[in-house]
Structures are given as C-alpha cells and as structure tokens.
Image (cartoon, helix red, strand yellow):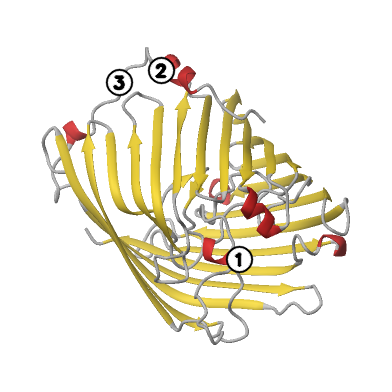
Amino acid sequence: MKKSLPFAALLVLSANAAAADSGQQTSNGFLEDSHLDVLLKNAYIKRDYKDVGVRDRDEWGQAIIATYNSGFTQGPVGFGVDGIAQYAVRLDGGRGRSGAGGIDFFAQDQDGKAKSDLAKFGARAKMRFSNTVLSYGNQRPALPIVTADESRLLYESFTGFMLDSQELRGLDISAGYFTAEQQKSDDSHDSGLNSLAFAGARYAFNDQFNAAFYASSVQDVQNKQYLGMTFTQPLTNDQKLILDFNGYNSRLDQSYADSLNTGRSNTIWSLAASYVLWDIHTFKIAWQQSSGSTGYHYGGYRKNGGIGDGGNTIWLANSYWSDFNGEDERSWQVAYSVDLSGLGAPGLSYDVAYVRGDNIKTSASSNGHEHEFFNQVQYKVPNGIAKNLKLKLRYSVLRVSSDAADYNIGGNEIRVFVEYPFSVM
C-alpha cells in the first residue's frame, strides 16, 4: 500500500472549487442552535468460547446517555460548549462472567468483581471561524485513524484538542492532539495514554469518487497511515456498483514490539465490491490481506498493553467479531443485505456474511485459519410514539484452528441491543 497520498494534490484539485457557505455566518446563537439528546440503551453480549479452559463471558446493562450541544455565539468568531453525561447499571455479568476485553461494559475491581454501576461526565469548549471548528476537552472522533468506540454500553472518549475545517466544498480536514483516553467501562480518565497526534483529510472529487488520507502517532507505541477510496458507478436508475478500498500501513515502536514479542511493520488492506439493486438488495464480495512482520494492531488501552487509538479504528471490509488481521492473513468474504422496507416491512433489515481467512502466521504454524458466519436482524420503529426505537439481534459463529490459538479464540457470540433515542430540546 502507498505510504503517503500527495496531500498537496488535494489542495490543488480543490483550488478552483467554490468555497463552502460559512457556517458561522448562519449562526442563530448559543441557545437558539443548542439541542439536548437522550439515548436509552439496553445491551447484552454473551460469548461462548470453544477453546478448552477458556471461561465463557457475558455482560448485561442498562444505560442512559445525555448529550448537549450548544450553538455558537454570533459574530466573526463563535463560541460554544458541549457536554455529555453517561450512567449505566449492571444487570448481570458479575464475578466470573465479566472481564472480556471485547465486551468491556463494566470494569473489574481488584477482587475481580465488575462494577455495579458507572457514571461518566465530559465537556468541551469550542470556537468557530467560518467553517473551521477548534475544540478542547472531551472528544469522540469518528475517523479511520482514530475512532472512539460507541458500539458497547457506554462511550469511549479522549481528552485534548481537535480541529475540523471544511472551508472548501468537498474537502474536510481534521487534526488533533490527545493526552488522555477514557475507556468505555470505567470512569477514570487515565488509561495510560501519553499522547496521540493525528491529521488528514477527505475529499469528494465528485458525486461518484472520494478519497481520504490520515496519519497518526501514538507516543512510544505506533505510527500509522490510512488510505481510503470509494467509487460509485450507477448502472441503471435502480442499480449501482460500489468499490471500496481501505488500507493501513503501521510501524510499532521497537520497545513496544519487544513487549509483545512480535515484529514491527504491518500493511493491511481490503477491497470490497457491492452490487445494489433497487436500494433493497446488496450483494458484496471482499478480499482482505495482511502482510509484514506482525499483524494489524489497534484499540485496547495502554495500561493493559493496547495501542490506545480507539476501539473501532479498523475500517476494513472483513471486520466482524473477528477482524481477520493476523500476521500474513488472507481472507475473503461473501455477504448479502436486504432492506425490507422496500418489501412491505418498514424499518426491518437483515445482514448475513461469511468470511474465511488462512495463511495466519503464529508461533505454531504459518498456515493457521479461521472462519466466521455472521448474521444480524435489525428493526427500527418508523413512526408513532416509539419512533426511532431500535432493536438489534446479532449472532456470530467463529472457529479458529488450534495452531492459531495464540492469535484468536473461537466461539459463538450473541448480541442483543435495544436503543431509544429522543430529543429534549
């Protein structure tokens, strides 16, 4: 994969583009543009591991998450404040069943007992000039190079500066510097992260093609670059073909690699082709390949030996329960999705996928393998008093060969999520 994208090319290509309308000029005021949103979330994850001696894990909790986003004061430079309050109660998953890193609802105390409840708060100050926003405080970035995980019970977040600029139409520039990470399952802001710096941009060349390049550096841990491209080709009025490329190039710090007893370099990429029919049916095939002296590393918490760059920082096609990101691993996928709204069942959708990986290099083999069967049904209430209430049921079957046991663990996973978002103001 290319280690860099000529960033200047993005600027040159957009030099003749019309400037985007100024967001600050259209500001109605601090209170006038503010809104308060609440999310009620009930979440359950159970993992039935198949390896001998590995204890099954499950956690269940109820959460309420309130997010406040102010508008900006009027004038050439606008100022505002955002805030978030999160509270969760453990319904099950106490001693002996909690503690799985991939579930991470409630952190364990020193005696191995999961917290019975959890409260977290955060805020950030922001300022805007034209279409450029600079903020400091609690951040939840959603970028391929650093993605705060919101897929569990409570949200992961970072503390630091973040810049987002959309001065030219189609060009979105992001940069940031974080000095702390707050894990999803704990109220402590000290997860061991020293610093994380990142920058990059996404540019929409036209309605059919967009590309992105980002780079990040986690102090004393890893340097990483990301390149992504998406091309959409309409075939007829009700058919289209989508090609989606995502790739990472990363290099671990020598001391960190030594602590994991692994090599330093990895390049991993995926290419997916999706055929969409009537905006109802989507048929997808994908190929993903990892190469280098180690697998692709991301997420986790520094105090536990992880990278510390966000639990969802893997924008690759074959990432489900398993990420298929082992050293030298190759994997292919076939998938099908259907939006049943177009077939007389508004709000109902179903996704199914099969992924198979091989050529995994471990201490025991150079050809470990794994395969996963994933399926998910989701229903979102389209109207009425319960509008936007969402129910998501997910079941995955993952099997990993015994010679790849030090890379991954097989099992069966069940996820049940019920979410109800609503606006207060």
Contact, mark 1 vs mark 2 (Cβ under 8 Å):
no
Q: Quadrant of the N terminus?
A: top right
- Residue type, label 1: Gly
Residue tagged 3: 19
Up-down relation of residue 333 to residue 238 (above or below): below
Q: Quadrant of the C terminus?
A: bottom left
Task: Judge by depth and name the residue closer to the eye, 12 or 258.
Answer: 258
| Mark 3 or 2, nearer chain start | 2
Badge 3 element: loop
Toward which corner of the image does residue 266 lie, by quadrant? top right
Indicate which disc residue 102 carries. Answer: 1
Which x, y percent locates residue 321?
66, 59
Toward which corner of the image does residue 349 lie, by quadrant? bottom right
Badge 2 element: helix
Q: Is residue 62 visible?
A: yes
Task: Judge by depth and name the residue closer to the eye, 317 or 232.
Answer: 317
Looking at the image, residue 232 sits to the left or right of residue 71; the answer is: right
Task: Judge by depth and name the residue closer to the eye, 405 or 41.
Answer: 405
Residue sitting at x 57%, y 27%: 4
| Mark 1 or 2, nearer chain start | 2
- Residue type, label 2: Ser
- Mark 3 and mark 2: Cα distance apart in space: 9 Å
- Mark 1 and mark 2: Cα distance apart in space: 41 Å
Residue sitting at x 51%, y 65%: 152
Contact, mark 3 vs mark 1 (Cβ under 8 Å):
no
Residue tagged 2: 14
Looking at the image, residue 282 sits to the left or right of residue 380; the answer is: right
- Mark 3 and mark 1: Cα distance apart in space: 43 Å
